[in-house]
Image (tube, rainbow, N blue to C red):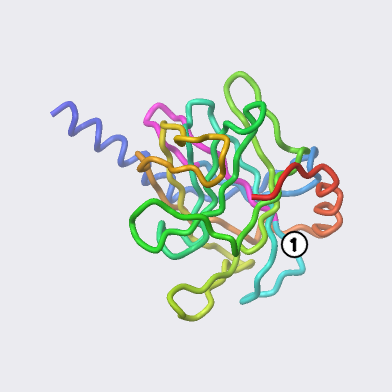
Amino acid sequence: MFWSLLFAVFATLLRSVSAAESVAVYDSETGLTYSQNFALYKADGRGITFRIAISSDVSSNSAYDAVVQVIVPNDVGWAGLAWGGTMTKNPLMVFWRGGSNNQPVLSSRWASAHATPQPYTTASYTLFKTGTKSNSTHWQFTALCTGCTSWAADGGAVRYVQPNGGNRLAFAYSPTKPSNPSSPTSAITVHDVHAYWNHDFNTARNTGFEAAVQRLLGSKKFRA
């Protein structure tokens, strides 16, 4: 009975993530306004903060770059963001801490089935030094993603993350670090938790986005 009740409470909390509304957050360090959602992975309130910023000049049904900023508790082994809102057949951003000097590692992946996602070279991530930091409880990274907002699977029609309105995104969490944490192609374990939400891209739009990105590229660290 206790475990059934605990599971019900946890499931309710996770469902609340899916229903949560995005909020606009301005980050003075990077000079961008982000659309933010909080993805819960523990019933005690622990979760990952996902922020996305895009250009105000982007049109519907077109590919575009996005800046993603993520705040991660230190107990996370690895986590991932699905740009198409599902594990399979869309670009995945998998990330963990464990590179040189325990820096963030960003791994572009694609899963054709419910199996370990494999490297995906069509999308790439450029990690910025600005907006990437850590403290005693959390770590944060800020990166430019190219190739994340459009894709085609199995020869089908091209799909887009629309820059106007909401898009379903998804995340996954595992407490276990990858087997080779210094490598972006390392094997990863099966996730313990996954959830979905509707991310508002209207509030992610920025005038002067390109200028901000060019400034941030001056502090870039690596490409994944």
The answer to which of 113 and 214 lies nearer the viewer is: 113
Magenta-colored segment: predominant secondary structure: strand
Examine the rendered structure and indicate whether residue 55 appears above or below residue 142: below
Examine the rendered structure and indicate whether residue 168 appears above or below residue 104: below
Numbered marks: total: 1
Q: Residue at x 46, y 30 (%)?
A: 46
Examine the rendered structure and indicate whether residue 43 appears above or below residue 147: above
Q: Residue at x 86, y 56 (%)?
A: 211
- Quadrant position of the N terminus in the picture: top left
Q: Residue at x 82, y 59 (%)?
A: 210
Asked if residue 148 lies in the magenta stretch, the reply is no
The answer to which of 51 and 185 lies nearer the viewer is: 185
Q: Is residue 153 left or right of residue 101?
A: left
- Residue type at tag 1: Ser
Residue denoted by label 1: 55
Q: Residue at x 60, y 40 (%)?
A: 105
Determine the residue located farthest toward the top in the rendered image.
Answer: 136
Asked if residue 43 lies in the magenta stretch, the reply is yes
Q: Is residue 82 left or right of residue 5?
A: right
For the record, the magenta segment spans: 39-53
Q: Is residue 120 left or right of residue 170?
A: right
- In the rendered image, residue 162, in percent from the top left (x then y), is placed at 59, 69
- In the rendered image, residue 164, in percent from the top left (x then y), is placed at 62, 67
- In the rendered image, residue 97, in percent from the top left (x then y), is placed at 57, 33
